[in-house]
Amino acid sequence: MDRSYSEITPYIRSLAAKSSGNNRIEPEMYLAHDVKRGLRDLDGNGVVTGLTEISKIISKQKQPDGTVRPCEGRLYYRGIDVRDFVNGFWREGRFGFEELTYLLLSSELPTAEELRTFSATVSDYRSLPPSFVRDIIMKASSRDIMNLLSRSVLALYSYDDNPDDISVENVLRQSLQLIAMFPLLAVYGYHAYRHYHLGKTLLIRNPKPWLSTAENILHILRKDGKFTEMEARVLDLALVLHAEHGGGNNSTFTTHVVTSSGTDTYSAVAAALGSLKGPRHGGANVKVVQMFDDMKAHCDTSSDASIREYLIKLLQKEAFDRSGLIYGMGHAVYSVSDPRAEILKDCAAELARENDCEEELALYRRVARLAPEAIAEKRRVYKGVSANVDFYSGLVYRMLRLPNELFTPIFAVARIVGWSAHRIEEIQNNGKIIRPAYLSVKDDRAYTPLKERA
């Protein structure tokens, strides 16, 4: 007989009610036991759990009087300020993602010849095993491209003749291959989704070896394969800004935890993808554009008062998805500003002029100004609130005509570089499995024989 594997039966519903009723840990219990909930202190600062040389985030500065105050956010890749790195390749009219990949993996800036050789190596790896598209991507295509990415990465284990070797050389080889393959896995997965779930014409186009990562994404995604130089450069910039953000973000910490068990690269990357998929992490940029669509449908976006009223409704769980969140606002580390958001905002202005989207960008800027005021009024805020990188990346991706389904996968296309660098660092420097402790707050009780239970 036919069976629905998605049905929530009355028994499952009753079992869930019992489970949720018995698993409640009240927030005040964390204070009583001095446990850092979510590895955060009361001010929202992350608990330091490791050391890294890959990137550094600065959001506070020590003052002459000894106090520590929030400051403009700064991000460093291997000791180099991200603003300086971006200005370097942007002024010279070059693409930066391949250069950044070399920097994060090797810890050094490449010479011109080293960059050419490295880019050619990545390009050589930009292909999938024979029949992989047919057997893995086309069969059981997914409505969620992140799900397909995870399955594809795990499937690549079977195509690797040496999948379990965790020497630095072998993991670096696997990392470079995954970095090169991710754009194909994401975009081909999207085309399969369009074909099998939306009834659209199937499009599978081969990448061009002389194009950059950003150019190839647009080339294999678009029906005509065409794009402007500005579009490719802004997408490349977005990849650079999303490639790495310290060891403390959820997906990178996941990479460290899973890597510390000694498992293979494919399992570690699949775990990181599962983390990034969540709307509190990589899925936030999709939520931002959906929130703005809802805002335009339910308020007068030409009026500050109307926008502010809508923002208050968001915080009171009366609008959009009723989550109580203004997506794209606030960050676990930054308070005054997110440097990635500031850089992307400036470049979004150029792209907006090219695509006649200046009115849309103006709305985003108004919300970025009004939202912190609304949050300060309705929330107990321990630190400042500002727009984060997700706030503007969703707008940029929409101006690039990227489908919503690819927003988070494009994040993964970039962040696989950071995950790879952190995986190699973990393999080289730790040697111990990461095993945090949880404190049990359940009272002891006696076992009741089955026949005596009510």
Image (cartoon, rainbow, N blue to C red):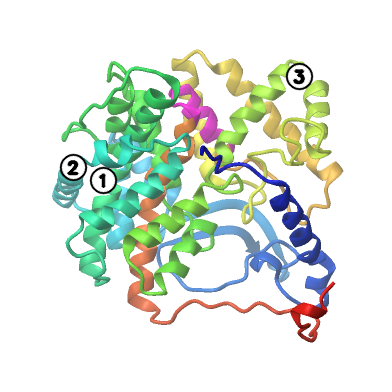
Tell me which residue sits at (43%, 53%) in the image: 244
Q: In which quarter of the image is the C terminus?
A: bottom right
Residue at position x 28%, y 51% from top? Answer: 178
Which stretch did the figure color magenta?
391-404
Disc 3 + disc 1, Cβ < 8 Å: no
Q: Position of residue 98 (x, y in %)?
A: 28, 45
Q: How far apart are marks 2 and 3 (CA)?
A: 46 Å
- Say which element carries label 1: helix
Report the disc number at residue 180: 1
> Looking at numbered disc 2 in the image, what kind of residue is underneath it?
Ser
Residue contact between numbered discs 1 and 2, judged by CB atoms under 8 Å: yes
Q: Work out whether residue 109 can be spotted.
A: no
Q: Mark 3 points at which residue?
A: 298
Provide the major secondary structure of the magenta segment: helix
Is any atom of residue 143 visible in this view?
A: yes
Looking at the image, residue 359 sits to the left or right of residue 311; the answer is left
Which badge, 2 or 3, comes first in the chain's sequence?
2
Residue 442 quadrant: bottom right
Identify the residue under disc 2.
123
Q: What residue type is labelled 3?
A: His
Question: Up-down: is 407 above or below 333?
Answer: above
Secondary structure at badge 3 equals helix
The amino acid type, in three-letter code, at marker 1 is: Ala
Query: Residue 349 in magenta?
Result: no
Between the C-alphas of marks 3 and 1, the distance is: 42 Å
The disc label shown at residue 454, or none = none
Residue in the image at 59% along x and 29% along y: 289
Left or right: where 423 falls relative to 205: right
Q: Nearer the viewer, residue 323 or 202?
A: 202
Q: Earlier in the sequence, mark 3 or mark 1?
A: 1
Crowding at mark 2 (Cα within 10 Å: few <14, some 14-19, many 20+): many
